[in-house]
Amino acid sequence: TVFDECTNMIVKQVDELKNLVNEFSSFARMPASNPTPNNLNDSLSEALILYQEGHKDILFSFRPDLSVPVFSLDRDQIKRVIINLLDNSVGAVTTSGNIEIESNYNPALQMVAFSISDNGCGIPAEDKPRLFEPYFSTKKSGTGLGLAIVATIISDHNGYIRVKDNQPNGTRFIVELPINRNTIDA
């Protein structure tokens, strides 16, 4: 009935507004970073399990570099980064999508990196420079704050995030985090 359709539309709009307020609140007052010794591969694996359970139609794979050391990072904030990037990948793929997570360690540079790649619709070249700007979104219901929050968290960890085209199609986000030699937990 028309009443049910209107009620459903109102509920949907309220949910979208709630999401907008939550994202804005998170961006407006990001909690101070609280780095402690953590295993990045564990954080990647934990986030991945959540998505594998919720999206059985998508093929997820994880190639961890087992030489990635324990190092200081804010576990909750890095998990938020991973979840946000996985969310974007899930939104970009079709029901037969593939999402790959990979980690690696470069001891010479004292740098740990992880990437999240998908075979989804990709990101137009003209949108890439603006992806990490607040309020820029390519989604109809997007707030434009998700990747801005990701960029802020990575910056707080003195790291870098890049976006590239995935081959043959899709998107690849690469996050690089430096390891302070004094914070490695031997």
Image (cartoon, grey):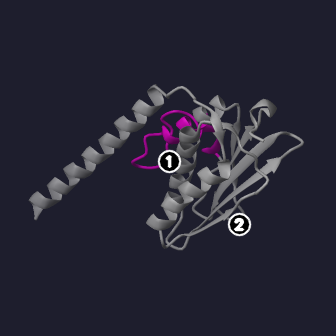
Residue stretch in magenta: 126-151
Q: Is residue 116 above or below residue 18?
A: below
Residue located 49% across and 28% down the image: 30
Q: CA distance from mark 2 to mark 1?
A: 21 Å
Which quadrant of the view contains residue 71?
top right
Front residue of this view, candidates 101 and 11: 101
Farthest residue in the front direction?
186
User: Is 27 a magenta residue?
Assistant: no
Nearer the observer, 143 or 80: 80
Residue 135 on the magenta segment? yes
Residue at 56% over, 34% down:
133
Q: Which residue is mark 1?
A: 138
Question: What residue would you read off at disc 2?
Answer: 168
Residue 76 vertical placement versus 139 (above, below): above
Q: For label 2, count other residues whose C-alpha is less than 10 Å away and answer few (under 14), some (14-19) or many (20+).
A: few
Considering only vertical position in the picture, is 75 above or below 166? above
Is 71 situated left or right of 21 in this image?
Answer: right
Can the viewer see residue 173 in this picture?
no
For the residue carrying disc 1, how many other residues have a C-alpha within 10 Å: few (<14), some (14-19), or many (20+)? few
Assign a secondary structure to mark 2. Answer: loop
- Visible residue check, residue 88: yes
Pointer 2 or 1: first along the chain: 1
Which element type, helix, strand or loop, lies under badge 1?
A: loop
Q: Position of residue 32 (x, y in %)?
A: 54, 26
User: Of helix, strand and loop, which mostly describes the magenta segment?
Assistant: loop
